[in-house]
Image: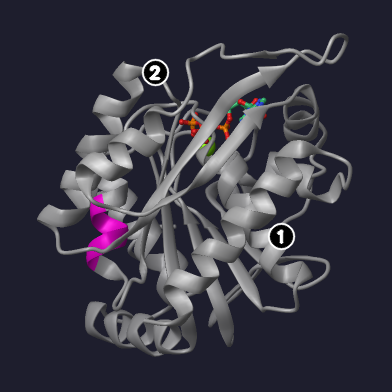
């Protein structure tokens, strides 16, 4: 992952990137203003739902400092094939291709202390030197906020369909999600919509719904900012378990969150496929 690879000059790399991205029909970024709101959860479950529907899907983990995609997909012990002419992503059945910096780190506990240009280099390499092949969707999981990684990804990927912004329902989170919308607008990237995650908790014993972080805020901020509201996902202990075990929650068929998620994916498809 340094500049002295065998993969040619900057201009050649730019051309490769353009060619590879031309083979990807839809490119979607998952971002948020705040950390820990469920971006990675949304990104991998979105990718897996689309793959289950028969689409060819890639997931690019652009969270350089906290690359969690492999862990949440239960593939953190796998490694991509690295050859002179490129990197083969890790394959997850039914048809998911995954690339993450986590695959390239020697230890899961190693912190990455890179500055902007090096991070930009790694992201560029993920886009230009990974054999993504023909994809229907490339889902990019981003770190929180509007720093180097979202900017690099947004600048490097041509024809992005847009960003999905994940938020939790409380006011402070909403303030941050508005920043994400403004960021997207400032760089001319469309916003596909807002997902309100951790929206209400149904007591498994009595069935009462408790609004731990309030409810409905994501929808308010979507209306305020004039972007689509994609739906809300409740808090479920199964989601925490699935994140830890590496078995995405959409594979749990009897879950309210899985149903909610299915509806969100349908909306996303509707929005990007008519563009
Ligand atoms: N709806 C939910 N119900 C219960 N737990 C959830 C829900 N959504 C996410 N989680 C859990 O919350 C934690 C944070 O989620 P996740 O890692 O997806 O957030 P993130 O926004 O990607 O975080 P980061 O900013 O660190 O990248 C995980 O343990 C995940 O399993
Ligand atoms: Mg994450």
Q: Residue at x 68, y 55 (%)?
A: 262
Of pointers 2 and 1, the one earlier in the residue sequence: 1
Can residue 99 be seen in the rendering of this structure? no
- Mark 1: give few (<14), some (14-19) or many (20+) Cα within 10 Å: many
Residue on which disc 2 sits: 170
Q: Quadrant of ligand 1?
A: top right
- The answer to whether residue 199 is above or below residue 26 is above
- The answer to whether residue 149 is above or below residue 159 is above
**Where does the magenta region start and end?**
151-155
- Mark 2: give few (<14), some (14-19) or many (20+) Cα within 10 Å: some
User: Residue 191 location, x and y as percent?
Assistant: 30, 58
User: Residue 201 location, x and y as percent?
Assistant: 67, 18
User: On the image, which quarter does residue 216 sit in?
Assistant: top left
User: Residue 257 location, x and y as percent?
Assistant: 71, 38
Q: Is residue 147 left or right of residue 83?
A: left
Mark 1 within 8 Å of ligand 1, using the beta carbon: no
- The answer to whether residue 81 is above or below residue 204 is below
Answer whether residue 226 is magenta in the image: no
Q: Quadrant of the N terminus?
A: bottom left
- Residue in front for this viewpoint, 164 or 243: 164
Residue on which disc 1 sits: 48
Can residue 57 be seen in the rendering of this structure? yes
Residues at marks 2 and 1, CA–CA distance in whole angstroms: 28 Å
- Residue in front for this viewpoint, 107 or 143: 143
Answer whether residue 152 is magenta in the image: yes
Q: Residue at x 59, y 68 (%)?
A: 58
Q: Which residue is drawn at 41% across and 66% down?
A: 125
Q: In which quarter of the image is the C terminus?
A: bottom left
Q: Residue at x 72, y 56 (%)?
A: 79
Mark 2 or 1, closer to the camera? 2
């Amino acid at each position: 992952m340094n500049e002295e690879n065998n993969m040619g000059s900057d201009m050649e790399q730019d051309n490769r990137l353009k060619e590879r991205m031309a083979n990807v029909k839809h490119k979607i970024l998952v971002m948020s203003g705040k950390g820990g709101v469920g971006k990675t959860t949304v990104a991998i479950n979105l990718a897996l739902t689309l793959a289950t529907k028969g689409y060819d899907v890639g997931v690019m983990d652009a969270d350089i400092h906290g690359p969690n995609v492999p862990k949440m997909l239960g593939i953190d012990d796998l490694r991509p094939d690295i050859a002179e002419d490129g990197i083969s992503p890790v394959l997850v059945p039914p048809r998911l291709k995954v690339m993450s910096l986590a695959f390239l780190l020697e230890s899961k506990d190693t912190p990455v202390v890179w500055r902007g240009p090096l991070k930009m280099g790694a992201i560029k390499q993920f886009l230009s030197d990974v054999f993504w092949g023909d994809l229907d969707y490339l889902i990019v999981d981003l770190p929180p906020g509007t720093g180097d990684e979202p900017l690099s990804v947004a600048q490097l990927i041509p024809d992005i369909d847009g960003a999905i912004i994940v938020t939790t329902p409380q006011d402070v989170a909403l303030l941050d999600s508005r920043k994400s919308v403004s960021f997207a607008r400032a760089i001319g990237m469309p916003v596909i919509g807002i997902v309100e995650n951790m929206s209400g908790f149904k007591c498994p014993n009595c069935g009462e719904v408790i609004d731990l972080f309030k409810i409905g805020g994501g929808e308010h901020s979507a209306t305020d900012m004039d972007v689509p509201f994609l739906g809300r996902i409740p808090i479920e202990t199964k989601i925490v378990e699935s994140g830890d075990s590496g078995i995405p929650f959409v594979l749990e068929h009897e879950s309210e969150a899985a149903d909610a998620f299915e509806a969100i994916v349908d909306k996303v498809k509707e929005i990007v496929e008519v563009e």
